Amino acid sequence: QALSQYDEVHGITFDYGQRHRQEIEVAKSLAIELKLASHKVMDTTLLNELAISALTRDAIPVSHELMNNGLPNTFVPGRNILFLTLAGIYAYQLGCDVIITGVCETDFSGYPDCRNEFVQSMQNSLALGMDKPLKIITPLMWLNKAETWALADKYQQLALVQHQTLTCYNGIVGKGCGDCPACVLRQRGLDDYLQNSQSVMDSLNSKL
């Protein structure tokens, strides 16, 4: 989507010592295939030392149950605060005025840093802190998982997203492990889209 709307697109992948390390290699290969202007892998491993989560500690199994604080144990505190701050700094140096991130509130998984309210506050803080207009765009924010698959299909990238991307918490590309929360949401959304493609596409188009 970004490639069709902007003259130049730069990608960032954050290496924070995450459980699904393969996502870094997947991002590198996709950046080449999609012909991004550049792709930067940013070292944020300090986050791994500070934030204890099932995504930063292999010894902590991914749970389907919420913790006592009401959050999933895959929540990495401060992750998107750090990521958007670093993306803002990088955008400033590149002369870019738009940051695009794939956070989503519709299929809310319990991550407070994926909410629209949070993103808007970060946009305001970055613009104020760097004295430069900066917009954070969240194309998936109000889409459910089925509509996200429809968006991939709309841009003729359904097969690529289906087979070459990684959302699995256990680091398995494509269909994933089929058991972790990320895989369950992903497959449920794909099934919904494939079974109701026209109605889902109509719903997507009404939101664009």
Image: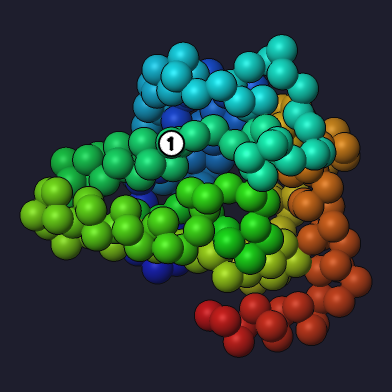
Left or right: 91, with 14 as reference point: left
Side (left or right) of 76 relative to 146:
left
Residue furthest to the front in view is 68
Q: Position of residue 173 (x, y in %)?
A: 74, 34
Task: Name the image quarter holding residue 120.
Answer: bottom left
Q: Which residue is under mark 1? A: 78
Please name whichever residue, 163 or 16, is drawn nearer the observer in this view of the structure: 16
Question: Most extreme residue toward the right, as rendered?
Answer: 195
Q: Is residue 37 left or right of residue 64?
A: left
Identity of the residue furthest to the left in this view: 131
Residue at position x 32%, y 58% in the image: 121
Dot 1 crowding, Cα within 10 Å, few <14, some 14–19, many 20+: few
Nearer to us in this view, 145 or 93: 145
Residue 193 position, x and y percent, is 81, 69
Image x and y of residue 41, in percent: 41, 28
| Rendered residue at 57%/81% (across/down) | 207
Along the line of sight, the residue nearer the viewer: 193 or 185: 185
- What residue type is disc 1 on? Gly
Q: Residue at x 61, y 25 (%)?
A: 53
Residue for point 69% across, 83% down: 203
Provide the secondary structure element on which disc 1 rests: loop
Quarter of image, res 158: bottom right
